[in-house]
Amino acid sequence: MLEIENVSHAYGDLVSLNRVSLRVGSGEIVCLLGPSGCGKTTLLRIVAGLEAAAEGAIRFAGVDLAGAPAHRRNFGLMFQDFALFPHMNVADNIAYGLRRRGESKRVIAREVESLLARVGLPGMRARDVAALSGGQQQRVALARSLAPRPRLLMLDEPLGSLDAQLRDQLALELRQIIKDQGLSAIYVTHDHREAYAVADKIAVMNIGAVEQVATPQSLYRKPKTAFVAMFLGMRNIFGAGQGDFAARLLSALECGRAEARAVLIHPSGIAFGTTTEDRSLCLDGALVGAVFRGDYYDVNVSLDCGASLYFPSPTLPVEFGAETPVRVAKDALIALDG
Amino acid sequence: MSGLTRRAALLVYLVPLVFLAVFFLYPLLSLFDLSLRPDGALDLSAFARLMSTDYYVGTLVFTVYQAMVSTIATLALALPCAFVFARYQFRGRSLLLSLATLPFVLPTVVVALAFAVVLGDGGLLNDLLRTLFSLDYSPVQLERTLTLIIIVHVFYNFAIALRIITSYWSSVGFATEEAARSLGARELDLWRDIRLPLIRPAMLSAAVLVFIFCFTSFGVVLILGGIRFATLEVQIYYQAVSIFNLPLAAALSLVQIVAMLAMLIVYTGTQRRLQVGLASRAAIVRKPRTATQRAMISACVILIAGLLFTPLLALIWRSLFLTGRLDLSGYTGLVERSRASLLFIAPLEAVFNSLRFAVMAMTAAFVLGLIASHMINRKGRWSRYSDPLFMLPLATSAVTLGFGFIIALDEPPLNLRSSWLIIPVSHTLVALPFVIRSVLPSLRAVPPSLGEAARVLGARPLTRLLTIDAPLVSRGLVVGATFAFMVSMGEFGASLFVAQRESVTIPVVIYRLIGDPGLSSYRQALAMSVILMLVCAGGFLMIERLRAAGVAEF
């Protein structure tokens, strides 16, 4: 459906996008995930037609969009701070796109009513948008961007200004509504948990370039670069510069790739105790830190060789400071490109 | 605070309150008295005459009409410029925005004369057109027309409208606009559905403020229009000074005061609405992308620079080259007493007078303003009542103040009518709100926790004042004092009423010199205007540099 091909963009001397390519299939939700300043919002604005790319092409259903102004693209865009029109009530906000298309009053009234029901705000037509709660404003913004039945929906950190509890709930609702409409969507966020929950496919971005595109599951299982692993919250990364331990890990990689410059020990493959399987590594260390998370502890074991391992554990087998063996499943070792 | 120091503090607070009561409320009440009871008994005949005479009704109608036209013209010009400023980043943007405020501090006599120099019958524009097209007449006939008055009003108020609309527009941001575009809105839809409705509170607020300024315009109308285009202000002056019809002048003043109060209430209402609205992310000014956008910026820059600098540079040019070659006799003539019949003193003495009065008014306004600000800054009832109280002189036109002075302070125990003291006192009154509005924000910006921290660390009250408060509010103090100095230097309306032969100030002398047909008088008027303009521009630059740190509420 949407094809982004070698798109570059710069603010003055500052390169914000460097030859970015990405595809969004029909009915697919693609998340752009990355830290602030990585270019994800800029890419979104270029697709929306609010910003012009310096190079590259954007095609939708095979048609090049170069020169098509934002108001002709029929792409829905939901803004980070919602950008609701403060001088209009809920119904007028939602109806705005329909009015621009010259729909009849009857059609508009019917659409607004059904959208309000769809986003869970029945009977709120005449409310002043400034008087709504954050979650309600978010729903109005979603209804407004859905109203003109866009060919593609884009969401720029749509949950960014809401509190954590509301975020989890609304992320699921958002995905459900987008899927129900059969829409293709681009979803920008810097929160990997939100991306896991919403996306069919995640594109991780770093300083203006896409580092990896994958499903949430395979992104979690097999991050390709050190940046991706770190951004997903994984800390057991050992670079070639870190001496014997890293060299030992590299050699332990059965089909060790020569070009690998670092090794990740996936936290899900680490546990306390020794092992009887030969497909595992056994390491000695001491428990130096543990954070209680409810269902589990985030523990930190300082290995005798000097390195630290971080992993989740359901129990704490020893006291702080005590010696403890740790086992690492061999398939938890992942080679990273730089 | 011990009981003794609390009582001492209350005594200190009394000083500005007494000043306000004696020099503001008392003259104002005298005005009311004179208009309602000219001979000791209630007598509304002055009002009856006012309302039944076509001429006076005409004055009222004209005052409203010219203010309305001026306001519309100002907004029509400021709106597109505000769009450019709020939206695009370009070289010199902030410099231009800050320079555009310069007219605000320029004395009316100087500006009126500057525009006469450019657009008058013998002005530079006509000179240029005559030379270009070899004409033997002046093609631009603007002298003594409403058009010229309105042009000058636009010059004065353009920056006020520009600043209010630009800052509001930047704060609401452009995200809603982009949302509308993504929903299919075209450029025309954007103006109709989003931009104009969104900035309506700012437009309204700017319109009311500009209307107030034009409604009370005195110097500009007096010099450029004369009695034929008398506004309420000019009519008060004319009735009181020229035909000595004091009850009628007082009745007109009362109308003026009531109208001002009504407009200020409306203005406060519009200001409150400026603060509502959805929170939005910080403004994003972008570099222009298309040729159209660059053309819009160029047009805006040329318009502002032209409107701003042409008259001021023309004034300097004319003061040096009135007859085509360099001639400094305007400046050298300032020391001569030869114009005795007209002025009674040498013009240079007026310069000394102005400086002397300005230093006195600045000192008095500074001290009173500091005490008043401190009082307003206290929590509770004091603040609620004292803030609007001290702003009242701002809401009263200078002419009304001057008129109130000469009818109230002319008999014992306070006979200042023939004393030069009356001038710095009147200037202090006019400058006081400016000082308070400059000092108060910096006082408010000092968090109480700083004083408490100093206290815990062992600082005594005086030490706290010297080491914590004074350094933190010093910028605000300097801005306030500079404002007071400039207000006093340029004050025209009140001075014209109360100045004696020997105590005339620069603006009054310029006005008298313009009225004299002689060429050497005109030269001296130009020279003095240039001097006054440079003094005010210097003060303005100082304020703008300090304001970069965010002090002052203007």
Image (spheres, coloured by chain):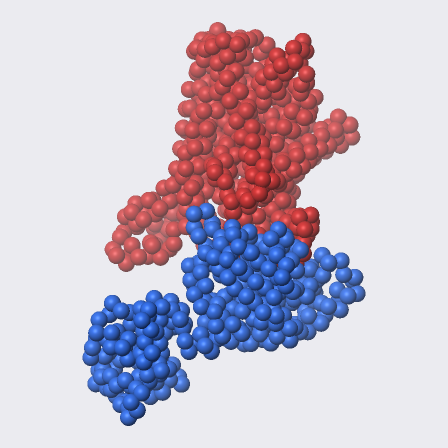
Q: Position of residue B348 (x, y in %)?
A: 44, 15
User: Which of these two is toward me, A157 or A49?
Assistant: A49
Is residue A294 shown above or below A29?
below
Chain shown in red = B
Quadrant for the N terminus of chain A, please. bottom right
Is residue B83 shown above or below B150?
below
Whether residue A126 appears in this view of the structure is yes
- Which residue is drawn at the image coordinates 42% and 24% (left, top)? B355
Decide if residue B288 is on the left or right side of residue A313.
Answer: right
User: Which of these two is toward me, A82 or A210?
Assistant: A210
- Which residue is drawn at the image coordinates 46% and 47% (left, top)? A12
Q: Position of residue A85 (x, y in %)?
A: 63, 58
- Which residue is drawn at the image coordinates 24% and 70% (left, top)? A242
User: Which of these two is toward me, B381 or B516?
Assistant: B516
Q: Quadrant of residue A256?
A: bottom left
Q: Position of residue A223 (x, y in %)?
A: 40, 73
Q: Colour of chain A?
A: blue
Quadrant for the C terminus of chain A, please. bottom left
Whether residue B343 appears in this view of the structure is no
User: Which of these two is toward me, B449 or B327?
Assistant: B327
Q: Quadrant of residue B480?
A: top left
- Which residue is drawn at the image coordinates 68% and 70% (left, top)? A115
Decide if residue A270 is on the left or right side of residue B27.
Answer: left
Decide if residue A323 is on the left or right side of residue B108.
Answer: left
Count of numbered circles in the view: 0
Name, please, the residue furthest toward the top: B338
Q: Position of residue B266 (x, y in %)?
A: 64, 46
Name, please, the residue furthest toward the bottom: A276
